[in-house]
Image: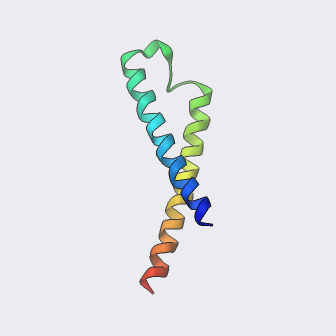
Amino acid sequence: MKKFKDILYNLNIVLAGMFIVFQILDIYNPTMNFIGNNVTVYLFFAFCVLSIVNSCFLLVHNRRTNR
């Protein structure tokens, strides 16, 4: 389970970094359309799901340590 959490945390960091880069590139060159293509939509969906799972793990961990 610890390995899964480590992978989850790293995936969140990587996807967040990708979206920051995509946004910066889209600002400087809007014709490349980094934010509006289908791949970015699926990556953003994956990022949202991973963030929700990550926050659930964190909430469970915090409740267990407070007891």
Render colour scheme? rainbow
The location of residue 41, given as percent across then percent down, is 58, 33
Q: Quadrant of residue 67?
A: bottom left
- Tell me: residue 47, above or below residue 65: above
Q: Is residue 56 above or below residue 50?
A: below
- Residue 35 pos. (x, y %): 50, 27
At x 57%, y 59%, the residue is 53
Left or right: residue 1 compared with residue 52: right
Residue 17 occupies quadrant = top left
Task: Answer above or below: position of 55 versus 51.
Answer: below
Q: Position of residue 31 (x, y in %)?
A: 47, 12
Seen at 51% across and 50% down, the residue is: 10
Question: Eyeballing the image, is 54 above or below 30?
Answer: below
Q: State the residue in front, 42 or 21.
A: 21
How many marks can you see? Answer: 0
Residue at image position (45%, 74%) is 62
Q: Residue furthest top?
A: 31
Residue lying farthest front? Answer: 3
Quadrant for the N terminus, please: bottom right
Report the front residue among 29 and 8: 8
Residue 30 place in picture, x, y as percent: 43, 16
Residue found 50% across the figure and 42% down from its top = 14
